[in-house]
């Protein structure tokens, strides 16, 4: 464990208050269809009996989060009724009165208190540099800024509209508890998180293997291998009881009503297609563009008949199923196999060579990125599951700082298509520029040395994002191509960012697999 910081934390409330005030400025900004999604869920949970929550389909935005989040919406609805009771009527589709907008925005800001508390706990776990007296250049301060002022969370939650900050608070708090060797608390928090939003199944393998290997087995042999005799059945029972109790609390009422199949069908809608409306920058984006290139070549070489091919099926900005034209079409089972294969080396690494809580954190990152790279119907916003935890390693390790700069810059820019309204263009551009400048400046000071954090080719690639942004956000809207190829910017953004995300994934794997010495246990 790192030595406690001797100075006061008076700067932390000011930092948190500053970002909260900034969020208030976005109350009247653009909001996506997710705003109506959550308004509808407020109405469903407030106006209907529990037995109808997962059957209600008046709106196309049906309830598709786990039951604990439904209860979260139920609790919010009792506050919402004091703002505008009409927002709680199921039949009031697309209702967005000023009072409704105010409540929805304030609810996100208020629930971000969970995230703020989690950030402080993570900052307390960071290893401080010896002799560092300047608070602004301390790892804990830099980490607080990277998390509290994270560009992705600001635009996804407080402009686009979601509750990711609230959910990431549980994830980061769980990670902090493991860094503090409070494993049962960490397991409880993660179990709660899974029952709030099931996308965090992405990182469940890291939790399961780490807790089994480093908590249920209490000792290692002298050579670092597992001591099978040290297995503690009581610890396994304690973990199982925690997870089982949370799941029973969440799903129990629906199991009792015989509605478990209905709930699961809402949570895992595999008919939505391989890619989301805006391509996530992952391996399937590269696969899609390769299919497009092969189609173009096939038509020009007269090997394919253009009239027989589907038109713009993958670039129409719609959530739907589609078939590839040349390459084999991808099914959910294929993505599952690819995802499992991609995280297997990371999982095996923390089993055979456990590296304490930071080894677990590295495995968590690779599970998040592996699932993002190869998963079915991946949302662009899921890149934040890797970016936020990587911030912790970035302030402690020079190599991780370089990977962080590539991943965070690329991953955050891939979120630009989510905010496509002209009025918000200056906001997202300025916010990202400020975050990128601070990230580069602060991490360079933190890891000062004669060698740059980035390799020359990495710098060239990131500078290329300026060209992509200028072309997609400024030049393209003024060109005649906007009418002929309306989704070309989405394609270019997704494919270009896919290269950076894939590169970061591979670099993280290299850094994990080449570790020769056993890190300090925490």
Image (cartoon, helix red, strand yellow):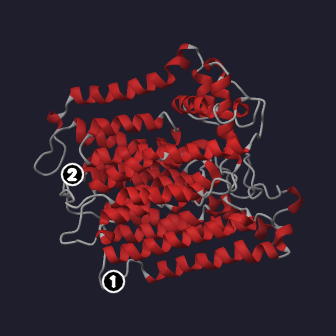
Q: Is residue 328 left or right of residue 247?
A: right
Q: Is residue 71 visible?
A: yes
List the single residue furthest toward the front: 82
Name the residue tied to disc 2.
522
Near mark 1 (Cα within 10 A), the count class, few <14, some 14-19 or many ≥20, is: few
Q: Position of residue 204 (x, y in %)?
A: 42, 41
Whether 188 is drawn above or below 481: the answer is: above
Whether 259 is drawn above or below 160: the answer is: above
Q: Is residue 203 visible?
A: no
List the single residue furthest toward the left: 222
Q: Secondary structure at mark 1?
A: loop
Whether 501 is drawn above or below 356: the answer is: below
Q: Secondary structure at mark 2?
A: loop
Name the residue tied to disc 1.
451
Residue 136, by quadrant, is bottom left
List the single residue furthest toward the right: 307
Q: Position of residue 100 (x, y in %)?
A: 68, 41
Could you tell which of marks 2 and 1 lies nearer the N-terminus? 1
Q: Are marks 2 and 1 in contact (CB under 8 Å)?
A: no
Q: Position of residue 309 (x, y in %)?
A: 83, 57
Q: Residue at x 38, y 60 (%)?
A: 144
Q: Is residue 515 left or right of residue 156?
A: left
Disc number for residue 314: none
Which residue occupies the foreground of this view, 4 or 387?
A: 4
Near mark 2 (Cα within 10 A), the count class, few <14, some 14-19 or many ≥20, is: some
Which residue occupies the foreground of this view, 339 or 85?
A: 85
């Amino acid at each position: 464990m790192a030595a406690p910081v001797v100075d006061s934390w008076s700067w932390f409330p000011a930092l948190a208050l500053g970002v909260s005030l900034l969020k208030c400025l976005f109350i009247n900004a653009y909001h996506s269809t997710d705003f109506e999604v959550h308004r509808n869920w407020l109405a469903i949970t407030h106006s209907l009996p529990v037995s109808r929550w997962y059957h209600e389909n008046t709106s196309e935005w049906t309830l598709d989060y786990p039951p604990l989040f439904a209860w979260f919406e139920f609790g919010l609805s009792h506050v919402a009724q004091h703002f505008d009771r009409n927002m709680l009527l199921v039949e009031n589709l697309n209702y967005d009165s000023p009072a409704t907008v105010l409540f929805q925005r304030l609810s996100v800001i208020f629930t971000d208190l969970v995230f703020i508390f989690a950030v402080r706990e993570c900052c307390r776990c960071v290893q401080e540099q010896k002799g560092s007296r300047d608070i602004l250049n301390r790892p804990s301060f830099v980490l607080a800024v990277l998390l509290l002022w994270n560009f992705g969370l600001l635009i996804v939650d407080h402009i686009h509209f979601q509750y990711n900050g609230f959910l990431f608070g549980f994830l980061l708090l769980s990670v902090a508890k493991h860094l503090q060797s409070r494993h049962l608390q960490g397991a409880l928090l993660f179990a709660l998180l899974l029952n709030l939003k099931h996308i965090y199944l992405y990182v469940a393998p890291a939790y399961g293997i780490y807790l089994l290997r480093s908590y249920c087995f209490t000792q290692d042999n002298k050579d670092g291998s597992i001591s099978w005799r040290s297995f503690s059945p009581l610890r396994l029972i304690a973990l199982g009881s925690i997870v089982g109790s949370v799941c029973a609390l969440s799903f129990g009422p629906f199991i009792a009503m015989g509605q478990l199949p209905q709930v699961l069908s809402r949570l895992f809608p595999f008919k939505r297609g391989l890619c989301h409306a805006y391509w996530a920058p992952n391996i399937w984006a590269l696969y899609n563009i390769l299919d497009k290139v092969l189609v173009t070549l096939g038509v020009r070489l007269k090997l394919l008949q253009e009239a027989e091919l589907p038109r713009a099926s993958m670039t129409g900005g719609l959530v739907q199923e589609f078939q590839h034209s040349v390459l084999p079409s991808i099914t959910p089972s294929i993505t599952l196999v690819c995802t499992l294969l991609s995280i297997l080396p990371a999982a095996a690494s923390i089993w055979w060579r456990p590296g304490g809580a930071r080894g677990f954190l590295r495995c968590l990152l690779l599970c998040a990125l592996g699932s993002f790279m190869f998963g079915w119907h991946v949302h662009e916003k899921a890149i934040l599951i890797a970016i936020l935890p990587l911030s912790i390693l970035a302030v402690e390790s020079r190599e991780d700082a370089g990977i962080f700069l590539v991943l965070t810059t690329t991953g955050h820019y891939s979120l630009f298509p989510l905010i496509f309204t002209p009025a918000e263009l200056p906001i997202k551009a300025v916010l990202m520029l400020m975050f990128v400048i601070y990230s580069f400046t602060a991490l360079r000071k933190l890891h000062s040395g004669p060698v740059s954090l980035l390799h020359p080719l990495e710098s060239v690639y990131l500078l290329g994002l300026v060209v992509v942004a200028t072309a997609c956000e400024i030049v393209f809207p003024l060109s005649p191509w906007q009418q002929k190829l309306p989704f070309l910017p989405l394609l270019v953004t997704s494919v270009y960012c896919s290269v950076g995300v894939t590169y970061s994934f591979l670099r993280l794997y290299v850094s994990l697999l080449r570790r020769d010495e056993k890190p300090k246990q925490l």
